[in-house]
Structure formats: structure tokens, C-alpha cells
Image (cartoon, helix red, strand yellow):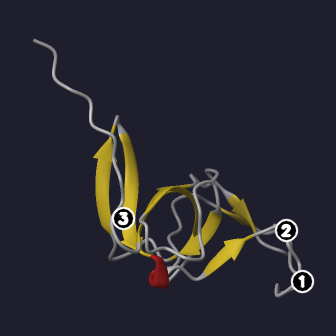
Amino acid sequence: MAEPKFEIQMLHDRVLIRLEHEAEERRSGSGIVIPATVKMANRLAWGEVCGVGASARTVKVGDKVLLNPEDQFEVELHAHTYLVMRERDLHAVATTETDHGTGLYL
């Protein structure tokens, strides 16, 4: 007998995020190459929202968000690692709207 499939629904203000993988090496603003082996302390990361709870008010599925990937809960689904966190722990949302933004673009 085949096992039933379950759809994941996030609860309350929880957000399910898939982290964007960084390139193997980065380049600083002045052109210095930073190898992939260099880990930077307290570095924030961008991720994509894959699920939101009913109480989440600011983000929606598909949004690109800025977050601290350390000290978050991880879950593995279909060989992909996702983060589960509260909406209030997100630092920013990348949007095409320019009403209240910083004037900076990705």
C-alpha cells in the first residue's frame, strides 16, 4: 500500500525559506576575490519564501528575504534543506515597489 502524501502548511507566523546558494567565490566591491573557504562572521543571507503561516502579514510565497541563517531550525524535504523561522526574525524583503525602500537594488 502506498503511503499518503501530505502537503505542508506553515502555522501562525512561521515562514519556510530555501537559502540561495552562494557562488564558490565572491568578489568585493573593489574587485578582490574572496575564496569560498572564507567564512564571514555574522553574515546575513538571501533566501526565497516557500511557505507562510496564516498570521504572516508582510511576506508571501516567492518573496526574496534577508535573514540570519545561524541559530534557525532546519528541515530536510526531498533532499533540499529549508529553514523554519518566525516572520519577525526576517531583516528585509526585496520588492519591486519603491514606496518605503532604501533606494538600493539587487
Q: Residues within 10 Å of mark 3 (few under 14, many from 20)?
A: some
Q: Residue at x 65, y 63 (%)?
A: 64
Percent across and percent down for residue 36 are 57, 58
Q: Residue at x 41, y 65 (%)?
A: 53
Q: Are marks 1 and 2 in contact (CB under 8 Å)?
A: no
Q: Is residue 56 above or below residue 100?
A: above
From the viewer's perspective, is residue 61 above or below residue 42? above
Q: Secondary structure at mark 3?
A: strand
Amino acid type, mark 3: Val
Which callout, 3 or 2, points to the residue nearer the camera?
A: 3
3D distance between C-alphas at marks 3 and 1: 29 Å
To which residue does mark 1 refer? 103
Percent x, y of residue 79: 35, 36
The residue beneath circle 2 is 31
| Image position of 6 (left or right of 81) | left
**Left or right, 106 with reference to 11:** right
**Residue at the image position 51 percent from the left and 57 percent from the top:** 19
